[in-house]
Image (cartoon, rainbow, N blue to C red):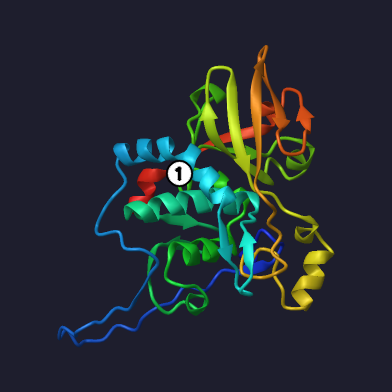
Amino acid sequence: MPESIHIGPDGTRYHHAATMTTTPTGDTTPKPVTARLKVFWKTMQKRWTGADIRAYQDAVPQLVEQVRTEWYWNHQGADSSNRFTCEDFAIRVLVQFAASRGLPLRLATGVRTYRNVEKHGLPEHPRYESTMYGFADMVAMTFGAPDVQRVNVNTARVNSPEALKPGDILALAHDFKGRRTGGRAHHIQLVTKVSPSTIEIYQGNSDSTIHWPITWVNKILGRNAADPQQSVYAGLPVETGKFIRSGTGWDYTNNTTGNAQRDYMKYFDLYRWNFLRFNE
């Protein structure tokens, strides 16, 4: 049987944990059980509803700018601005909204499923503070652009550009690089505003440290470019861009760099977070 392996955003290979079994006994006496929980934020038994989804879509234009421009104290004690990889930015925006409303999150990668309230004791728990920031950093370690393509788990498909809403995700999967890997997404953008003629986006990005052989060198040195808590983190300042309808296609311009691509939307798959699945 082939070995079950997940490859993280930085190229790190993770083995799935083996299934654990218990030994049955004949003792049917009820036993008291104490469960310790890792609580990143309390949900107070709240669940996502249609009203929450619409509120998220309404909040995205203001929320992305807040996340993009805020400053904070980093783990070295220095004043620093936010940097994000593409998927980490999308996650952070979602997390910030959910935590502010006490709503649950459930995000799956090839390693495991992450929840804002988890049974305490996983090896990574001590490294992350019990806040929305700790949760976002923990998920970032293994959540990559291809995890957006986990339809019916993390996301649902959006049928056309005309159906996009703020907060939806464009996954770059059918350009030359994507076709070489069978349509595996390697970059995502977060939709922030839509009109019949324009789709605006924000995106995180990555530097060269996510590519071999730098990933190999970092691994030898015990460093991880996918870890937002490390100085070698590959995230870059957030960029903005827009798609303009042109005939039957959508032309793209990156507002930050000035780069432009004609009929660029055809290379993207379109997704929306699977909000109701977060309730499970």
Q: Which residue: 32% across, 55% down? A: 102
Q: Position of residue 195 (x, y in %)?
A: 52, 21
Q: Choose between 127 and 163: the one closer to the eye.
A: 127
**Quadrant of the snapshot with the N terminus:** bottom right
In this view, which residue lies farthest toward the right?
A: 213
Between 202 and 182, the one lying in front of the other is: 202
Q: Position of residue 256 (x, y in %)?
A: 72, 38
Circle 1: element type: loop
What's the amino acid at mark 1?
A: Asn
Residue 141 vertical placement versus 34 (above, below)? above
Task: Give the camera-side residue of 136 and 34.
Answer: 136
Using residue 247 as the reference point, say whether residue 160 is left or right of it.
left
On screen, 95 above or below 12?
A: above
Residue receiving disc 1: 152
Task: For residue 52, say whether it is visible.
Answer: yes
Occupied quadrant, residue 203: top right
Q: Is 221 displayed left or right of 103 in the figure? A: right
Question: Would residue 158 appear left or right of 203 to someone viewing this image?
Answer: left
Residue at 43% x, 66% y is 131
Q: Where 136 falls versus 118 (above or below)?
A: above
Residue at horizontal 29 percent and vertical 83 percent from the top: 24
